[in-house]
Image (cartoon, helix red, strand yellow):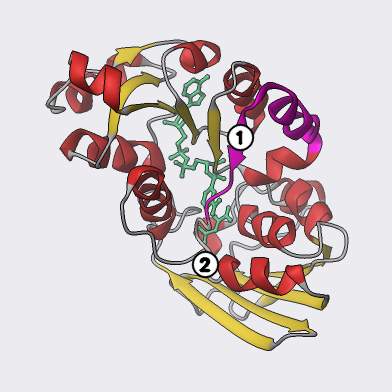
């Protein structure tokens, strides 16, 4: 990073160069107004050498818990069990943490207090979802109910703890099967890599215990499909999104783009949407 970026721009570090992280790193390397990629954390540096060599400017490679020292904004896009070691050092230093493994926040909610006490921020992008601007706005008034239905292809659900613990065979499904119905909080435990979106929705609206979700394994869909119904005193709205899976079949392609859009807003002159 050159001195001009260091003095005028925001330094961004990325934890995890998987399907989401590589796209954000590429976008930053190609140029986002006022932002520069300063550091990354990877599990196995050798596996990412070719990708790193392709970047125009090489960021530092650091352990995940040191990213907060090397950046103003740390983007968490690693498996959710690492959330704390990424976010805590950043917000303790008054930095911002962008969190995509949102489900992991529910068991680490004290990080919000830690951020508040130290002038840090935790930013949750809309991610693979839609319409959190409208949910935020409705939540200024009274939201009566938020209901969500998620359908995923079989490949996108394999290995989810709820499926494994309940010994459910989804490999031979010929028709959609409702796997789960309950709160966003319970869903995040059973499907930690599948329903981060439900937790983001809940944090924008009426919280993880009152936000209801169904999760379906659906051999008839090729996309990750999320449908949402919100009933509020200001409006009633229905939203839907059909995400094309990325190279990680659990993760929709739009997730990385949502983070890039959020990063662009940090220094953009014209910001559209709340
Ligand atoms: N908020 C949202 O809308 C969405 C959130 N997600 C969540 O985002 C997170 C990332 O998703 P993907 O990029 O698809 O996952 P991924 O599995 O493609 O990438 C995760 C990366 O983290 C790396 N990693 C693991 N341990 C590490 C460590 N100790 N230090 C550094 N790197 C480490 C892995 O090697 C891998 O490259 C997941 O928790 C996923 O559930 C996914 C989709 C939507
Ligand atoms: O990509 C998606 O459609 C949603 C997803 O995996 C998540 O929320 O964790």
Magenta range is 107-125
Of the two numbered discs 1 and 2 in the rendering, the one whose residue sits closer to the viewer: 1
- Residue extending furthest bottom? 236
Q: Circle 2 — which element?
A: loop
Determine if the magenta segment contains residue 210. Answer: no
Determine if the magenta segment contains residue 123. Answer: yes
Residue 248 coordinates in the image, percent (x, y): 42, 48
- Alpha-carbon neighbours of circle 2 within 10 Å: few (<14), some, or many (≥20)? many
Q: Nearer the viewer, residue 156 or 148?
A: 148
Q: In the rendered image of this protein, does residue 33 appear above or below residue 117? A: below
Instruction: Indicate which disc residue 153 carries.
Output: 2
Q: In which quarter of the image is the N terminus?
A: top left
Q: Circle 1 — which element?
A: strand
Give me the residue at 62% from left, 28% from top: 120
Q: Which of 240 and 5 is in front in this view?
A: 5
The reply to whether dot 1 and dot 2 touch (C-beta < 8 Å) is no
Quadrant for ligand 2 reads bottom right
Q: Which quarter of the picture shows residue 186?
A: bottom right
Q: Nearer the viewer, residue 149 or 202?
A: 202
Residue 9 visible (yes or no): yes
Residue receiving disc 1: 121
Give me the residue at 25% from left, 42% from top: 32
Give me the residue at 16% from left, 22% from top: 57
Q: Nearer the viewer, residue 68 or 54?
A: 68
Q: Which quarter of the picture shows residue 157?
A: bottom right
Q: Distance between the residues labelled 1 and 2?
A: 35 Å
User: Does residue 223 appear to the left or right of 206 in the view shown?
Assistant: left
Residue 128 coordinates in the image, percent (x, y): 50, 60
């Amino acid at each position: 990073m050159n001195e001009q970026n260091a003095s005028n721009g925001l330094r961004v570090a990325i934890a995890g160069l998987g399907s989401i992280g590589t796209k954000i790193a590429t976008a930053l390397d190609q140029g986002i107004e006022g932002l520069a990629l300063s550091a990354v954390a990877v599990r196995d540096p050798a596996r990412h050498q070719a990708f790193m060599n392709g970047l125009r400017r090489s960021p530092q490679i650091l352990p995940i818990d040191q990213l907060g020292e090397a950046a103003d904004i740390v983007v968490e896009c690693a498996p959710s069990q690492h959330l704390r070691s990424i976010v805590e050092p950043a917000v303790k230093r008054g930095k911002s943490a962008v969190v995509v493994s949102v489900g992991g926040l529910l068991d680490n909610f004290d990080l919000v207090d830690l951020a508040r006490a130290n002038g840090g921020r935790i930013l949750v992008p809309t991610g693979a979802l839609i319409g959190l601007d409208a949910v935020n706005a409705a939540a200024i008034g009274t939201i009566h109910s938020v209901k969500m239905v998620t359908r995923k292809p079989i490949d996108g659900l394999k290995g989810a703890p709820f499926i494994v613990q309940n010994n459910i065979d989804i490999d031979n499904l010929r028709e959609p099967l409702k796997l789960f119905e309950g709160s966003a909080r319970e869903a995040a435990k059973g499907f930690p890599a599948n329903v981060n979106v439900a937790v983001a929705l809940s944090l924008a609206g009426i919280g993880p215990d009152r936000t209801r979700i169904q999760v379906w394994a659906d051999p008839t869909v090729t996309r990750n499909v999320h449908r949402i119904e919100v009933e509020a005193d200001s409006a009633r709205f229905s939203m839907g999104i059909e995400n094309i899976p990325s190279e990680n079949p659990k993760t929709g392609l739009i997730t990385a783009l949502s983070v890039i859009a959020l990063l662009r807003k940090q220094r953009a002159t014209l910001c559209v949407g709340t």
